[in-house]
Amino acid sequence: MQEKPSPGSKPAASPQTRRGFLGWLLGGGVIALLGSILYPVLRFIVPPKVAESTEVSVVAAKVGDLAPNAGKTFKFGSRPGILVRTPSGEYRAFSAICTHLQCTVQYRDDQQSIWCACHNGRFDLSGRNVAGPPPRPLEMYDVAVRGDEIVVSKRS
Amino acid sequence: MAIRPGARPNWLAERYDIAGWIHFLQKKAVPRHHASVFYFLGGMTLFLFFVQVATGILLLLYYRPTAEAAFESVQFIMTQVSFGWLIRSIHSWSANLMVLFAFLHMFSVFFMKAYRKPREMTWVSGTLLLVLTLCFGFSGYLLPWNTLAFFATRVGTEIAGALPFIGKHLLHLMRGGEDVTGATLTRFFGFHVAVLPMITTALVLLHLMMVQIQGMSLPLRRDGSVPKEFGKRMPFFPNFLARDALAWVVTIGILAALAAIFPWELGEKADPYASAPAGIRPEWYFVFMFETLKLIPAKIGPIDGEILGILGFGVCGLLLVLVPFIDRRAQRGQWSLGFTIAGVIALVYMAVMTAVSYLMGGPK
Amino acid sequence: MSFPSCMKPAARAPAALALAALLGIPASLRADAKFEATSCAKCHEEVGDELAVPVKALRDGDVHAAVGLGCADCHGGDPVIAAGGEPDQDRAHAASAGFRGKPSPAQIPELCGGCHGNADFMHKYNPNLATDQLARYRTSTHGQLNAKGDVNVATCVSCHGAHGIMRVGDPRAPVYPLHVPDTCGRCHANEVLMRPYGIHTDQLAQYRESVHGRALYEKSDLSAPTCNDCHGNHGAAPPGVTSVALICGECHATSRAFFQESVHKEAFDLARQPECTACHGNHGIVPASDSFVGTEPASWCARCHFPGDAGLAVGAELRGMLDSVSTEIETAKTIVERAGHAGMEVSAGKFSLQDAHTALVQARDATHTLEPGKVREKATAGLKAARDAAGTGQAALAEREVRRRGLAVSLLFIVIVCVALAGTIRRLDARAGLRDS
């Protein structure tokens, strides 16, 4: 029921305008809400740049980065790995965590072996512990060359 | 859809004879009384189920169901995929909320004795849906393949294996072998995304259809009467549905807030050879059963305490499903004190046992 | 005095051999086949008490018995029992059969060395086993005293046992790495035994508390040095002043190399101070700590340097660098952990923290050069890695803020929709005639 506006006061909004306003508010709100739901969903569906988890496989280096008889450490998930190119040119990859007291190992081209500076432990190019305190070989990873990328992945 | 009379005939009506259905839906009305608010619980559970299906399908785009890759894939979703944290956290929170609302719905229907004639089969399908919801929770919990889930699954399947006669076979079927391994994970995944959804969808449709056809029940009062209604019944379309929508929008807000402020933890990758961490506990909705089994004495007479406990819960479950057929008084339209008391005891028992476990047990 | 007749069925020995043949194990490799059949074993076991102990020890797992050697191979005498007869002590202990009885401490080294020092002979049993033990022993303090007639000093059997000898790799052997300190300690921790030599007896106690001892006993790190790793086992002697660093340097190669190029090397040589042990100690080596370096009275620099001298200033500088890296790492660790607990991705942060920690270890090692430049190199790398880690952690926490802001925006939309819905509900109710209740 429409009321007569009393003198001196602003006219109250009519039910029609209220309904219209409500309609706009609801419609607008719903569209905004649907947008804020659809936006994350659509972004989710688009695959991320790194297609696979770096815990399982990672690009350790590009072909040509490493000369024969050289090595480099790389990030594998949250742990260090070491990529080694043997003097004969073959690629090998291991966990860079020394099996003695978990220091990070490094490649020694003068000894053609993997060396741990902490207590002078040494591993050969197959990861076997050959000198010093380390009690076990280094964990070995699979290496595959795809195009110009060297991909290291955990052994299944 | 031409709902209002006098509106121009539309494309669908010209092709499909749905006038009768539309008329029926327009007639659907919800009674209004002091306990009407409980009528929302079922729709809430259904909404949360839809949220689970949607977020679950999205997670399927990235999840890998093998022991080697499952944990890493969930970690990938949480850290690398855009809004992966949001989808996964909503899925986990909504799962828990769905179980909660399923229980609330069940208890409210129970205390209002809505299971009485003519709604017995609605109740039966409902209790089966509750069991399916718990199965969803149990199977889904293992999928991230973290330490807690691994050991909780081992304990849970161990308990199932303690049943007499069928226990060993049941254990093998559930685990896909002797022990919890990658085979268990793949199997649980199959249950979680295919078998259970299929059965649940069928039962939900049945359940909804029966509710639609029979309309809402009125709660039974102590003197056998039904509450006084506040006048005209509320049309389901659009009044009740608008209220449902409001509740659902609020739920979306709550889920978003929970996901953003309390993202679901990932924990550590399961190591089958490590010893179980202290304070292993299943999900909260199983805790009351778990705590009961822990507190039961090792032997009651000649019978093994644990087996008695498991059988006890099994019998309770069976009784729950068969309540409409056991509650003679309710069948006759009379209020049954015994059943109400039993319900209160059950509710209190579950709450107390859950509290005891969390207050006395180790850190989760 | 004639020996009490041993009541053993005459068929026992042939039966044992037959059993061995049935099981397919060569008779010579089964201990009981050889030494059990001797008169020594039979009599000594029957007499019992002390005299039976060697029999039980050989039976339990003795490396000599396992390869078919028996009592007479060391003690001489005649172990054979006449067919159908009883063990005869006179025959067994006959001097004409070479019976030696219990060898004296002076005789033992040559007795064992007679086989173990003969490369040709040992080739038959274990071509890879060293044959220089006797020669080394004679260079050792133990060996020299033993040659002079000291009967209390260690001989072969003191460490290896006489009967029931087990290989070094056997966890039950007294010379297994885990047991070596206790074996040496049997004499060297005994006040009464050591007093005549003027040797102190606190080494074992000190070793147990040391970082090497804890590594051995608490972490079961069998590569941790025990007594023989520094002193030698057969050629046991305290390392000389110059050889200490070489021995420590077998594992701590980088520290030794750094020290050799430092100014301390010449100073220590002039002062006739052993290189590593002068600061780190020998038996009671404590875990290294940054507090060793610096200007506090309790620091190691202050042991020789005076306040105001150049050396102490270098110590202060080195300590400052180590402290700054440590603090930076701690800060970064806190941030990364906080972000990780909030559910954010921090693997890059953890990786940088590992790098930072490695750099800190290398910086600490480089303090042996006493050159601030070398230490600064590593310290800078450590600081950078720690700051990278902290940066990752901060980024993760900032991302959390972004999420909350996104949440706020969507909650705003939700509130708008709820308000609109509430209004719509009122309107619908009014239209349906429900609002008059």
Image (spheres, coloured by chain):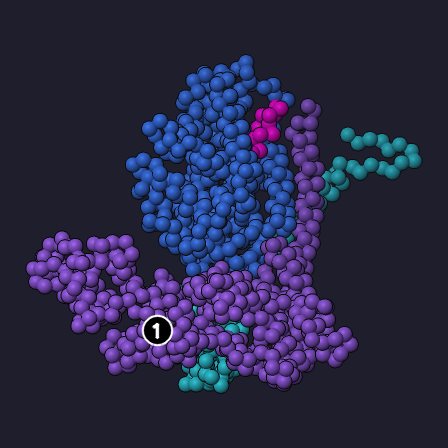
Chain colours: A cyan, B blue, C purple
At 60% across and 30% down in the image, what residue appears? B37
Among the 4 quarters of the image, the one containing residue C175: bottom left
- Magenta span: predominant SS is helix
Observer-nearest of B361 and C277: C277
Residues A29 and C367: in front is C367
Pick the front one: C197 or C332: C197
Q: Looking at the image, which residue is at 29% across and 56% down?
A: C50
Which residue is painted at 58% across and 53% down in the image? B86
Secondary structure found at label 1? loop
Q: Which residues are magenta?
A: B30-49
10 Å neighbourhood of mark 1: few (<14), some, or many (≥20)? some
Residue C69 placed where, x, y %? 22, 69
Q: Position of residue B240 (x, y in %)?
A: 60, 33
**Residue that sits furthest to the left in the current view:** C84
Quadrant housing the N terminus of chain B: top right
Q: As displayed, is residue B108 above or below residue C136?
A: above
Q: Residue at x 53, y 64 (%)?
A: C202
Residue C392: image quadrant is bottom right
Q: Is residue A115 above or below residue B17?
A: below
Is residue C196 positioned above or below C267 on the image? above
Chain bearing mark 1? C
> Can you say whether C354 is above or below B288 in the image?
below
Tag 1: amino acid: Ala
- Residue B253: within the magenta? no
- Residue B20 location in percent, x, y? 49, 33
Q: Which residue was labeled with disc 1?
A: C106
Residue C115 visible (yes or no): yes
Residue C129: image location, x then y, percent = 32, 76
